[in-house]
Image: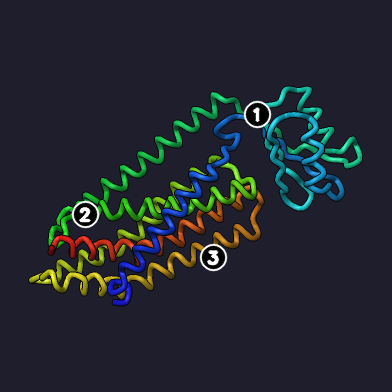
């Protein structure tokens, strides 16, 4: 199959994207939201036309509240993220948002999260990601425990881990760019997106690996010379199904990104990127890596 024949090109492309994503993370970093560092979130809706975002940025900077992020929501509203506010500061922010009473507004929500809550949320998010990753590895090791020829079962799990890292690092790299240039902040939806990408990505990889396992079991004598043909044939039998399944999900996510609320746009974009590269890695990375490992064993 074309993919297996040119496997080094696809593997090199994936390595390049991962390296660029890691460089982006090191250079730009991630802007942490109030969910993790604590702070206040204020949402307001204007009775008439809302003022320009630039005018609000300038007015809020004069309050000396530190970093304040203003995000539009809907057609007439704004979400303001800032450090924790006391009652006087809260009232002053609302007055400033109305530009001295010139623009009538209604506060629809105000939430304050303390630093201790943010630290606890960070700890639980890290634990959740680690536990999910371990559960995935254990499942793969169990599911492919009877596969031992010509590539042992633990190598299937190792390759699945590599593809998971690939599928998570690239969306994170994209998020660092969004964070640097558009002010996107790492919040609980970011963690949900990472966990969802892990589950969807490994599902696609397991489907293709399972087809390879079935075709290997159907062979009475498996020679090392035809292993790549079996993997290539397995890809031909399953890649259309994988692409079509992922495409339906991506279309829904694109609709959410286009027509959904501002608060879920980065979440939808992260999932879309994760789904795309998760499907790519299952077809163009995981299986070629399997063949590459088998070729190294022959040396």
Classify the position of the N terminus by image quarter.
bottom left
Labelled pair 1, 2 in contact (Cβ < 8 Å): no
Q: Residue at x 47, y 49 (%)?
A: 23
- Considering depth in this image, is 118 or 176 the residue closer to the camera? 176
Tell me which label, 1 or 3, sits earlier in the chain: 1
Q: Is residue 171 above or below residue 296?
A: above
Q: Position of residue 153 (x, y in %)?
A: 18, 54
Residue 217 falls left or right of residue 30? left
User: Within the image, what quadrant is residue 69 found in?
Assistant: top right
Q: Which residue is mark 2?
A: 155
Q: Which residue is mark 3?
A: 251
- Considering depth in this image, is 282 or 178 the residue closer to the camera? 178
- Considering depth in this image, is 19 or 85 the residue closer to the camera? 19
User: Within the image, what quadrant is residue 155 found in?
Assistant: bottom left
Residue 47 falls left or right of residue 158? right
Q: Position of residue 105 (x, y in %)?
A: 83, 40
Element on which disc 1 rests: strand
User: Disc 3 to disc 2, how far (Cα)?
Assistant: 33 Å
Residue found farthest to the bottom: 1
Q: Is residue 89 above or below residue 169?
A: above
User: Disc 1 to disc 3, how far (Cα)?
Assistant: 35 Å
Residue 71 falls left or right of residue 203? right
Tell me which label, 1 or 2, sits earlier in the chain: 1
Element on which disc 3 rests: helix
Q: Position of residue 209 (x, y in %)?
A: 26, 62
Is disc 1 surrounded by few (<14), some (14 to 19) or many (20+) residues within 10 Å? some
Q: Which residue is mark 1?
A: 112
Is disc 2 surrounded by few (<14), some (14 to 19) or many (20+) residues within 10 Å? some
Q: Residue at x 80, y 28 (%)?
A: 91
Q: Position of residue 288 (x, y in %)?
A: 28, 65
Tell me which label, 3 or 2, sits earlier in the chain: 2
């Amino acid at each position: 199959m074309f993919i297996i024949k040119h496997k080094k090109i696809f593997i090199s492309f994936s390595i390049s994207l991962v390296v660029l994503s890691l460089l982006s993370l090191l250079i730009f970093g991630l802007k942490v939201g109030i969910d993790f560092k604590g702070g206040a979130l204020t949402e307001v809706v204007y009775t008439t036309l809302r003022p320009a975002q630039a005018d609000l940025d300038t007015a809020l900077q004069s309050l000396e509240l530190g970093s304040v992020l203003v995000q539009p929501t809907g057609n007439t509203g704004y979400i303001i993220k800032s450090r924790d506010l006391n009652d006087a500061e809260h009232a002053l922010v609302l007055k400033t948002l109305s530009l001295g009473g010139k623009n009538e507004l209604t506060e629809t929500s105000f939430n304050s999260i303390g630093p201790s809550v943010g630290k606890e949320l960070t700890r639980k998010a890290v634990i959740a990601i680690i536990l999910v990753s371990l559960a995935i590895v254990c499942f793969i090791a169990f599911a492919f425990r009877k596969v031992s020829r010509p590539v042992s079962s633990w190598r299937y799990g190792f390759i699945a881990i590599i593809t998971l890292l690939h599928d998570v690092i690239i969306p994170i790299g994209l998020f660092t760019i969004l964070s640097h240039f558009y002010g996107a902040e790492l919040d609980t939806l970011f963690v949900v997106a990472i966990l969802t990408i892990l589950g969807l990505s490994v599902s696609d990889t397991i489907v293709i690996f399972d087809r390879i396992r079935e075709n290997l079991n159907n062979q009475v004598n498996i020679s090392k010379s035809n292993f790549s043909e079996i993997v290539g044939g397995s890809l031909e039998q399953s890649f259309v199904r994988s692409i079509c399944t992922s495409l339906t999900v991506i279309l829904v996510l694109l609709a959410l990104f286009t027509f959904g609320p501002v608060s879920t746009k980065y979440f939808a974009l992260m999932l879309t990127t994760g789904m795309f590269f998760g499907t790519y890695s299952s077809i163009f990375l995981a299986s070629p890596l399997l063949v590459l490992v088998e070729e190294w064993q022959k040396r």
